[in-house]
Image (spheres, rainbow, N blue to C red):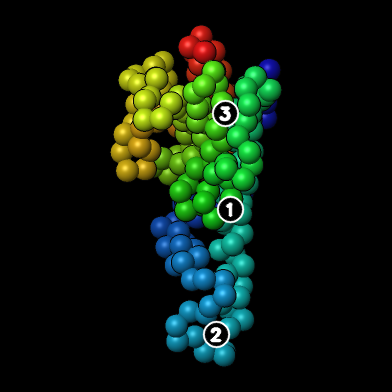
């Protein structure tokens, strides 16, 4: 069944389309919400409040987009097959997801941990997974649409080779197919 494309919110499109917007949003979000920027004047306060609200909108819209994408890519595929981690342990808070640029939910599979994620790599949406027990990784190498990535951003993950630019609409069908293949592989290994 083909689903409708996921619409990238305007705030997120602007954030990824313009490096100046991205730098401004990141600078504002680096300031604690309980503090003001150094040297701000009373006259600048209303503009800062509006800029802060716009930056928070970008952050929330991006995390919500990753959550919806995760649900469509992994959530429906996994459904009730395996025990999902407690919500308190998931990497799903707005701050974590925005700063780390991924939304992640883990599952218990036959004594192993299946890590599932939707996130950003080079400003493109990707899906990723890893099957682990302690420091042992069970799936590694190139695997039909996934490649092993062990870098600073994606340390020890199978990351989808197809990726989707963060503009306009995201057709998730390829990523959903890859997730289905990954789940099938994990089932065979369980």
Farthest bottom residue in view: 42
Q: Nearer the viewer, mark 1 or mark 3?
A: 3
Number of residues whose C-alpha sits closer than 10 Å to that of mark 2, classed few (under 14), some (14–19) or many (20 or more): few
Number of residues whose C-alpha sits closer than 10 Å to that of mark 3, classed few (under 14), some (14–19) or many (20 or more): many
Residue shown at the point (60%, 34%) measured from the top left:
85
Residue under pointer 2: 44
Q: Earlier in the sequence, mark 3 or mark 2?
A: 2
Q: What label does residue 83 carry, if any?
A: none
Q: CA distance from mark 3 to mark 2?
A: 48 Å
Q: Quadrant of residue 121?
A: top left
Q: Position of residue 74 (x, y in %)?
A: 59, 27
Q: What label does residue 107 carry, if any?
A: 3
Residue under pointer 1: 94
Instruction: Give the structural element (helix, strand or loop) at label 1.
Output: helix
Q: Quadrant of residue 140?
A: top left
Residue shown at the point (41%, 15%) measured from the top left:
144
The reply, left or right, for residue 163 in relation to residue 7 is left
Residue 147 seen in this snapshot: no
Residue shown at the point (57%, 89%) measured from the top left:
43
Q: Taking 97 as reference, is 53 above or below it? A: below
Observer-nearest of 63 and 21 = 63
Count of all numbered marks drawn on residues in the image: 3
Instruction: Give the structural element (helix, strand or loop) at label 3.
Output: strand
The reply, left or right, for residue 98 in relation to residue 135 is right
Q: Nearer the viewer, mark 3 or mark 2?
A: 3
Q: Position of residue 50 (x, y in %)?
A: 61, 73
Q: Nearer the viewer, mark 2 or mark 1?
A: 1
Q: Earlier in the sequence, mark 1 or mark 3?
A: 1
Q: Position of residue 51 (x, y in %)?
A: 57, 71
């Amino acid at each position: 069944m083909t689903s409708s494309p996921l619409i990238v919110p305007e705030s997120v499109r602007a954030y990824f389309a313009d490096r100046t917007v991205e730098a401004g949003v990141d600078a504002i979000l680096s300031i604690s919400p309980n503090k003001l920027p150094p040297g701000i004047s009373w006259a600048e306060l209303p503009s800062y409040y509006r800029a802060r609200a716009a930056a928070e909108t970008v952050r929330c819209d991006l995390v919500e987009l990753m959550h919806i994408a995760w649900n469509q890519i992994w959530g429906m595929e996994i459904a009730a097959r395996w025990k999902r981690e407690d919500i308190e342990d998931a990497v799903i808070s707005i701050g974590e997801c925005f700063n780390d640029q991924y939304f992640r939910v883990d599952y218990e599979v036959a004594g192993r941990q299946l890590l599932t994620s939707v996130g950003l790599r080079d400003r493109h949406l990707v899906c990723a997974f890893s099957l682990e027990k302690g420091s042992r990784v069970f799936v590694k190498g190139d695997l039909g649409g996934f490649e092993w990535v062990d870098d600073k951003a994606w340390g020890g993950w199978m990351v989808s080779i197809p990726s989707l630019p963060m503009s306009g609409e995201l057709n998730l069908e390829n990523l959903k197919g890859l997730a289905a293949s990954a789940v099938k592989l994990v089932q065979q290994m369980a």
